[in-house]
Amino acid sequence: MCGRYSLSIRKAALLTRFPGAEGTPEHEPRFNIAPTQTAPVLIMGRGGRPVWAALQWGIRSPGGALVINARIETAHERPLFRPLLAGGRCLIPSDGFFEWGPAEGGGRRRPHRFILADGAVFTMAGLWRPPRTPEEVGAFVALTTRANALVGALHSRMPVMLLPEQEGDWLSPNRNFERLREKISVPFDAGRMRRYAVASAVNRADRDGPECVEPAPAQGRLELF
């Protein structure tokens, strides 16, 4: 966790949500963002203001493995992430993420989407690394923490979801990581979230249409925790 997420709002709405950010994100509504794909991310600019960047989801380890998530509890212990904990923090805008529940009746595992109860955009805490060679592009990973009760019914981990008032502190390289970790590693309030089952279209990384976020016919009702 997390292995897929969405950012289905239009560019104008994204700019309204982050009015202080510099630049313009390369964005069209995305319903099924998968590892290795490029997505809009906010990083700290040289002028001390957030800047839009188009980064690839997943950082390659020295051994070549693609790493898409980092545990916030142990990120400081891993050489891959330790250099990024001050100046390499980023915000990953999202309006939902996916997790897969147990298989039913011997069939496939059913995907579920987790959103805020009011449907608003939120941010996930992340780490990013600039390209090291001309052939590379910048890349990011999402930080995870222990799951709240809503997500925990399907998985033991969930993204580190930030409150709006925490976003500036997370981006700032002057804010101590250890102190921030104590605050943001607390699982997001389950009472402010909803989950619902979606159709199997989201299982395929090459599918990126509205059908990926539509409620599954058999379980079309949103569930308020």
Image (cartoon, rainbow, N blue to C red):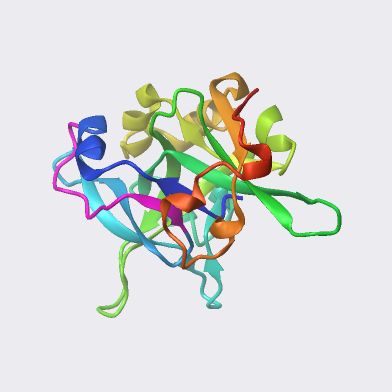
Is residue 47 shown above or below 138? above
Name, please, the residue furthest toward the bottom.
Answer: 135
* Relative to 134, 129 lies left or right: right
Q: What stretch is highlighted in magenta?
A: 19-33
Q: Which residue is drawn at 52% across and 44% down?
A: 97
Q: Is residue 148 visible?
A: no
Dominant SS of magenta comes to loop
Is residue 209 shown above or below 186? below
Is residue 69 shown above or below 207? above
* Relative to 16, 102 lies left or right: right
Residue 28, position as x, y percentages in the image: 27, 53
Q: Which residue is drawn at 55% across and 54% down?
A: 69
Residue 43, position as x, y percentages in the image: 28, 47
Name, please, the residue furthest toward the right.
Answer: 105
* Relative to 52, 144 lies left or right: right
Q: Which residue is drawn at 37% across and 52% down?
A: 30
Q: Nearer the viewer, residue 136 or 83?
A: 136
Residue 151, position as x, y percentages in the image: 66, 36
Snapshot quadrant of residue 121 = top left
Snapshot quadrant of residue 93 = top left
Q: Is residue 199 visible?
A: yes
* Relative to 144, 87 lies left or right: left
Q: Nearer the viewer, residue 199 or 181?
A: 199
Name, please, the residue furthest toward the front.
Answer: 217
Name, please, the residue furthest toward the top.
Answer: 191
Q: How many labels does the image show?
A: 0
Residue 168, position as x, y percentages in the image: 31, 30
Q: Which of 156 and 49 is in front in this view?
A: 156
> Magenta stretch containing residue 201, yes or no?
no
Q: Which residue is drawn at 44% across and 56% down?
A: 33
- Quadrant including the C terminus: top right
Q: Which of 29 and 37 is in front in this view?
A: 29
